[in-house]
């Protein structure tokens, strides 16, 4: 029987084991001997607090040791899955995704990988069953509870002090910080950094739109197209006409490469950059999950609120569940008079598992025709959202998107191009609707992030965080050579293209 004084010894053994488990993280962290003292101390404090809390709750120290290791292992596996798919380690604000994975399993669980998911479940069940039945609940004595409580308090104090010190050293470049401090300390530092986020400079707080003196305010449609980018320079053999409408409108307007703050997911970072005009680096820790902080009231002026102030009806439409990323609560705070979610698309049908772009185009075109007031419509599409590997190409479908003899052997590429071609058709329809309306119109189109196509990138290279954009208007004379821009600058580019100015208040 282990005495109460043996609990700290088990804690030390557990800490060593936790370091060994963390050594499997990706990207690999520096060895503990080369990390900053605050990182190692924070790691030790987190483990001590977790282990002692489990001892208090379970009254089985050895069982608590196994549960703690199982939780460490699961966290490392989730981190590695995210890093493999999204090129970014697990972050503190990703805790929301555990609940989202239950609410929307199709969006998340397939990326974890079947083998890893089974391994986590099997190990967890094995630890629980073995620990519960093999060890009696002996640590209920006053001595045991006193020791465990003291360890918990010490661990919590250590984490509180050392994490604040480490948070001041964060670069907010996840890959760098993750390697420098290790998974657990990095998470703790991020948690501490949330309490000291700087107040960002909000460009639309200082600007007021000054419409041109021409009669008739234009309808403005901005589309954040899911996973949209031009793959023709990345994947050889794609038919040039896959993006027919995009190419035509790009020649008539402004276009080019767009630097975006996300890869493969984290759409809200792109939405926020476009609407706020704020570069991610100005947000500190807020850049990783900006909508969580919108609700705290730090944002009071956006591109949408500027349009509303200029006399527009502002509408955001996203054909998915309104509670996802709290959009139904956040969008009114971002300046939108109306938020439209999947409930308005109950009868939409298409090949995609999500609401397809054709149905979304129908809704937007119908909305444009129903208002005497000029409208600013911000559209967040869903059709090309992964996981693409859950869909199956039709026989011979690859030949629809690749030149003869160049058909891709990767089914994900074919599925992606199917949805990309549908997005291009949506773009053409929106432009035609704006062109045919009595009121002038303007259209902004951009991709939120590159798609998840690991087999393509393995052969042809990682594309980085870059997509494509265009800004077009129904009135002629906008054509310019392609130019690279950052997404947080695109809203101002749209205003300039309309022919307006944004004056200082």
Image (cartoon, grey):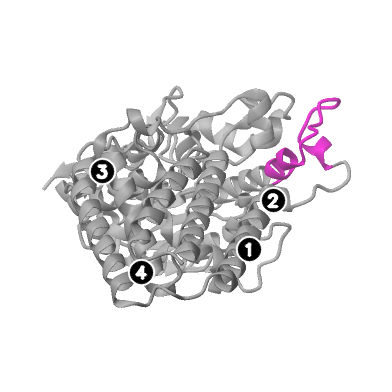
**Residue at disc 3, secondary structure:** helix
**Residue at disc 2, secondary structure:** helix
Compare residues 396 and 308 and report the one nearer the observer: 396
Q: Which residue is mark 1?
A: 126
Task: Identify the mark at residue 115; answer none if there is no mark.
Answer: 2
Q: Is residue 449 magenta?
A: no
Q: Is residue 198 left or right of residue 323?
A: left
Position above or below: 410 against 213: above
**Residue at disc 4, secondary structure:** helix
Q: Does any portion of residue 359 appear in the rendered image? A: yes
Position above or below: 320 against 406: below
Instruction: Pinpoint residue 491: horizontal percent, then vertical percent.
Output: 34, 43
Q: Residue at x 49, y 57 (%)?
A: 71
The Cα atoms of the two marked residues, 3 and 1, are separated by 41 Å
**Which region is colored magenta?**
397-418
Compare residues 428 and 84 and report the one nearer the observer: 84
Q: Which residue is mark 3?
A: 284
Q: Nearer the viewer, mark 1 or mark 2?
A: 1
Compare residues 164 and 424 and report the one nearer the observer: 164
Q: Quadrant of residue 376?
A: bottom left
Q: Nearer the viewer, mark 2 or mark 3?
A: 2
Q: Are marks 1 and 2 in contact (CB under 8 Å)?
A: no
Lower sequence index among marks 4 and 2: 2
Q: Quadrant of residue 459?
A: top right
Task: Identify the mark at residue 329; answer none if there is no mark.
Answer: 4
């Amino acid at each position: 029987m282990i005495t109460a004084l043996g609990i700290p010894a088990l804690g030390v053994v557990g800490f060593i084991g936790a370091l060994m488990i963390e050594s499997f993280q990706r990207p690999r962290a520096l060895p503990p001997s080369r990390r900053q003292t605050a990182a190692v101390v924070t790691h030790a404090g987190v483990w001590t607090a977790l282990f002692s809390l489990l001892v208090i709750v379970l009254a089985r120290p050895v069982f608590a040791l196994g549960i703690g290791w199982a939780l460490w292992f699961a966290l490392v596996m989730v981190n590695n899955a995210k890093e493999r798919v999204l090129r970014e380690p697990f972050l503190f604000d990703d805790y929301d995704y555990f609940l989202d994975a239950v609410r929307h399993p199709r969006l998340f669980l397939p990326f974890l990988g079947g083998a890893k998911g089974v391994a986590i479940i099997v190990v967890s069940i094995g630890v629980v069953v073995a620990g519960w039945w093999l060890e009696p609940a002996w640590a209920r004595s006053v001595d045991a509870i006193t020791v465990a409580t003291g360890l918990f308090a010490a661990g919590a104090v250590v984490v509180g002090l050392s994490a604040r010190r480490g948070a001041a050293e964060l670069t907010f470049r996840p890959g760098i910080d993750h390697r420098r401090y290790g998974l657990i300390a990095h998470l703790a530092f991020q948690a501490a950094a949330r309490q000291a986020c700087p107040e960002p400079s909000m460009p639309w707080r200082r600007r007021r739109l000054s419409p041109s003196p021409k009669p008739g305010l234009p309808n403005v449609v901005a589309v954040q197209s899911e996973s949209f980018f031009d793959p023709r320079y990345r994947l050889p053999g794609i038919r040039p006409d896959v993006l027919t409408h995009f190419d035509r409108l790009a020649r008539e307007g402004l276009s080019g490469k767009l630097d975006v703050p996300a890869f493969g997911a984290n759409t809200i970072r792109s939405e926020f950059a476009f609407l706020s005009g704020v570069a991610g680096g100005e947000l500190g820790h807020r850049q990783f999950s900006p909508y969580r902080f919108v609700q705290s009231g730090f944002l009071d002026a956006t591109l949408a609120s500027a349009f509303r102030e200029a006399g527009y009806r502002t509408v955001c439409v996203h054909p998915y569940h309104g509670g996802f990323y709290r959009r139904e609560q956040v969008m009114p705070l971002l300046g939108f008079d109306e938020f439209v979610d999947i409930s308005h698309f109950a009868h939409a049908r298409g090949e995609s598992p999500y609401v397809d772009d054709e149905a979304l185009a129908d809704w937007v075109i119908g909305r444009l025709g129903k208002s005497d007031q000029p409208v600013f419509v911000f559209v967040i599409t869903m059709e090309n959202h992964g996981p693409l590997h859950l869909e199956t190409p039709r026989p011979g479908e690859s030949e629809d998107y690749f030149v003869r003899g160049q058909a891709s052997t990767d089914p994900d590429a074919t599925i992606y191009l199917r949805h990309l071609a549908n997005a291009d058709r949506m773009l053409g329809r929106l432009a035609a609707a704006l062109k045919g309306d009595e009121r002038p119109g303007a259209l902004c189109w951009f991709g939120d992030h590159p798609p998840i196509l690991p087999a393509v990138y393995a052969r042809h290279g990682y594309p980085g965080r870059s997509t494509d954009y265009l800004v077009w208007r129904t009135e002629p004379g906008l054509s310019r050579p392609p130019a690279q821009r950052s997404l947080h600058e695109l809203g101002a580019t749209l205003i300039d293209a309309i022919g307006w100015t944004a004056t200082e208040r």
